[in-house]
Amino acid sequence: MCMEKGKNVLCEKPLAMNLTEVNELISAARKHNVFLMEAFWSRFFPVYEKIRSLLNQKALGEVKIVRAEFGVNLLHVPRSVEKELGGGALLDIGCYCIQFALMAFGGEKPESITAKGFLHETGVDETVTVILQYSGKRQAVPNLHLFDSNAKPSCDMWHKRNDSDSFIHVVSNNNNS
Ligand SMILES: NC(=O)C1=CN([C@@H]2O[C@H](COP(=O)(O)OP(=O)(O)OC[C@H]3O[C@@H](n4cnc5c(N)ncnc54)[C@H](OP(=O)(O)O)[C@@H]3O)[C@@H](O)[C@H]2O)C=CC1
Ligand SMILES: O=C1OC[C@@H](O)[C@H](O)[C@H]1O
């Protein structure tokens, strides 16, 4: 609606609930020549900027394994657990882990995606572990859940260059971001 009226849109995550909706939004932005962006605030953290700079310079070699973990107790929040409101761990908080993995692999499309988890009583995903597999034995493993607010979000990246390994570890001081 906003884009149809020529308004630029900065949309809270998740941009939409599925690929069809995302494609509709992108088409609308192109048709009406407006700016559309998913508001991932974590992408603007200074530490992300530092990581991107290291990745761009290929300072640490090839990214081999990425792990990202985020859990927040949102089981009491209707929009997080009701299907029709777009609930579920993946859409609500898992998207932070997934976008971290996508950033680490420069937006490359994985060769395969596997996910295992448990459903909440409302039918939305409550706990999920995803494995994104890339060519050359590279993989990302996001782990996300809606019940543990004591866990501090964290992510790691293992790199390989010739015979040496290096490692980036990021952990938040805040349980919620
Ligand atoms: N970047 C971040 O750190 C965070 C991002 N988020 C994201 O922000 C978004 C909102 O979350 P949150 O604020 O917690 O959600 P809430 O459910 O608290 O608020 C949603 C708001 O949207 C309004 N609304 C819902 N449906 C419509 C509609 N069809 N037309 C107009 N207004 C509508 C509601 O109005 P009413 O009250 O009248 O129902 C309410 O004011 C989510 O996408 C969430 O993922 C959330 C928390 C943190
Ligand atoms: O975007 C988010 O990040 C922090 C969470 O606590 C919040 O509910 C979620 O929607």
Image: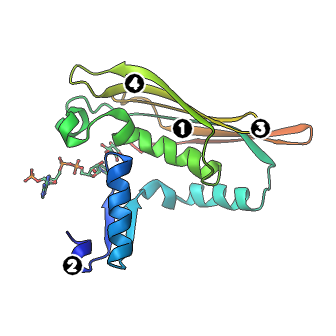
Q: First in sequence: mark 3 or mark 1?
A: 3
Q: First in sequence: mark 4 or mark 3?
A: 4
Question: Which label number is shown at residue 154?
Answer: 1
Type of residue at label 1?
Ser
Which residue in the structure is indicated by mark 2? 5
Q: Secondary structure at mark 1?
A: strand
Q: Secondary structure at mark 2?
A: helix
Residue occupying image coordinates x 31% and y 46%: 17
Type of residue at label 4?
Thr
Whether label 4 touches label 1, CB < 8 Å? no
Whether label 2 touches label 1, CB < 8 Å? no
Q: Quadrant of the N terminus?
A: bottom left
- Give the image location of residue 111, x and y in percent: 63, 38
Q: CA distance from mark 2 to mark 4?
A: 39 Å
For disc 1, the neighbor class at 10 Å (few under 14, some 14 to 19, many from 20) is some
Which residue in the structure is indicated by mark 3? 136
Q: Secondary structure at mark 3?
A: loop
Whether label 3 touches label 1, CB < 8 Å? no
Type of residue at label 3?
Gly
- Give the image location of residue 114, x and y in percent: 53, 28
Q: Secondary structure at mark 4?
A: strand
Looking at the image, which is closer to me, 77 or 14?
A: 14
